[in-house]
Image (spheres, rainbow, N blue to C red):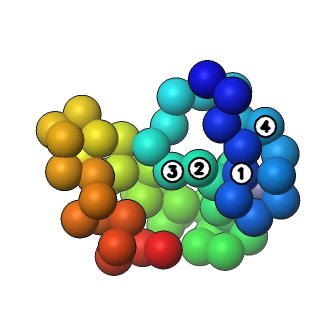
């Protein structure tokens, strides 16, 4: 809890792997790609290999 978007500093209320709000995520990657990135990084976080994916997208 208490995460903030790395781009606009908006508060993020869910427990997502990426510290990026939906507004910025969609602005940078577009809605389709952003949904894919969120799912991929959340799955990676559950598996414990998030660092690998963060390097690819950020
Ligand atoms: Zn943001």
Confirm if mark 4 falls within 8 A of ligand 1.
Answer: no
Around disc 2, counting alpha carbons within 10 Å, would you say few (fewer than 14), some (14 to 19), or many (20 or more)?
some
Q: CA distance from mark 1 to mark 3?
A: 9 Å
Residue 5 visible in this rendered orientation of the protein: yes
Contact check, label 2 and label 1, Cβ < 8 Å:
yes
- The spot of residue 35 in percent (x, y) is 50, 53
Above or below, 43 relative to 52? above
Around disc 3, counting alpha carbons within 10 Å, would you say few (fewer than 14), some (14 to 19), or many (20 or more)?
many
Above or below, 38 relative to 3? below
* Residue identified by numbered label 1: 5
Confirm if mark 1 falls within 8 A of ligand 1.
Answer: yes
Around disc 4, counting alpha carbons within 10 Å, would you say few (fewer than 14), some (14 to 19), or many (20 or more)?
some
Q: CA distance from mark 2 to mark 1?
A: 5 Å
Depth check, front residue: 3 or 42: 3
* Residue identified by numbered label 2: 19
- The quarter holding residue 1 reads top right
Say the numbered circle drawn on residue 56.
none
Say the numbered circle drawn on residue 18.
3
Residue 43 visible in this rendered orientation of the protein: no
Around disc 1, counting alpha carbons within 10 Å, would you say few (fewer than 14), some (14 to 19), or many (20 or more)?
some
User: What residue is drawn where x is 59% and y is 73%?
Assistant: 29
Contact check, label 4 and label 2, Cβ < 8 Å:
no
Contact check, label 3 and label 2, Cβ < 8 Å:
yes
Q: Looking at the image, in which quadrant does ligand 1 appear?
A: bottom right
Q: CA distance from mark 4 to mark 1?
A: 6 Å
Q: CA distance from mark 3 to mark 2?
A: 4 Å
Above or below, 48 relative to 2? below
Contact check, label 4 and label 1, Cβ < 8 Å:
yes
* Residue identified by numbered label 4: 11
Lateral position of residue 38 relative to residue 10, left or right: left
């Amino acid at each position: 809890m208490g995460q903030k978007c790395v781009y606009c500093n908006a508060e993020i209320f869910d427990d997502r792997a990426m510290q990026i709000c939906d507004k910025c995520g969609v602005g940078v990657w577009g809605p389709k790609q952003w949904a894919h990135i969120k799912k991929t990084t959340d799955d990676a976080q559950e598996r414990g290999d998030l660092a690998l994916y963060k390097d690819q997208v950020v």
